[in-house]
Amino acid sequence: MKLKNWQLALALGLGAAAVALKLSSCVSIPKGAKAVKPFYKDKYLGKWYEIARLDFKYEKNLNNVTATYTLRGDGLIRVDNRGYDFVNNKWKQSVGKAKFAGDPNTGRLQVSFFGPFYAGYNVIAIDDNYKYALIAGNNLNYLWILSREKTIPEAIKSDYLEKAKSIVYDVSKLVWDQHDR
């Protein structure tokens, strides 16, 4: 059976789309990192202050960064990130969605701000009261320290830095957020 040019093009296009969709939903966790379990979504919801991050283009020149997580009507989590661009003197906001990357009792989520493209969001440390969290991205380029308050106790900070170093994060590159607004 000989395929016509348009049939071949359609088949190749559908195949490429399927591969792209599969790759866009792949999320990972850095080698040596382990997501917390059990993880309680309802305790995690609410407002978090970013204490530190490994900088990347979407957060460049931002301080006063917060992330607010709320439950959506469809069961997904609404992610509302907000920060003040101190170079351009204006607030920036990005709203996305998150869902579990497998077991909902494990702190492994996938987050999307751009359509069907997801990135890993791995809660690798959290205190019993859900006041402080250490988050790993897909790889060693993404790391966040979060707090329910604008500061974090030195003991927690030190513990999270040691945990990040044990996974081979370069913590000397962390940007320490300022919360003055």
Image: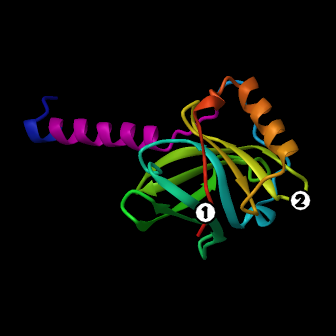
User: Under tag 2, what secondary structure?
Assistant: loop
Q: What residue span does the magenta drawing correspond to?
A: 8-29
Q: Main secondary structure of the magenta part?
A: helix
The mark found on residue 129 in the picture is 2
Query: Quadrant location of the C terminus?
Result: bottom right
Q: Is residue 14 magenta?
A: yes
| The furthest residue to the right | 128
| The furthest residue to the bottom | 73
User: Under tag 1, what secondary structure?
Assistant: strand
Q: Position of residue 83 (x, y in %)?
A: 51, 62
User: How packed is label 1: few (under 14 Cα within 10 Å), some, or many (20 or more)?
Assistant: many
Q: Image quarter for residue 143?
A: top right
Q: Between 158 and 29, which is closer to the camera in this rendering?
A: 158
Q: Is residue 174 above or below residue 82?
A: above
Please indicate whether residue 26 sits to the left or right of residue 108 in the image. Answer: left
Q: Residue at x 82, y 59 (%)?
A: 131
The mark found on residue 66 in the picture is 1
Q: Position of residue 47 (x, y in %)?
A: 69, 67
Mark nearer the viewer, 1 or 2 = 1
Q: Is residue 111 above or below residue 44?
A: above
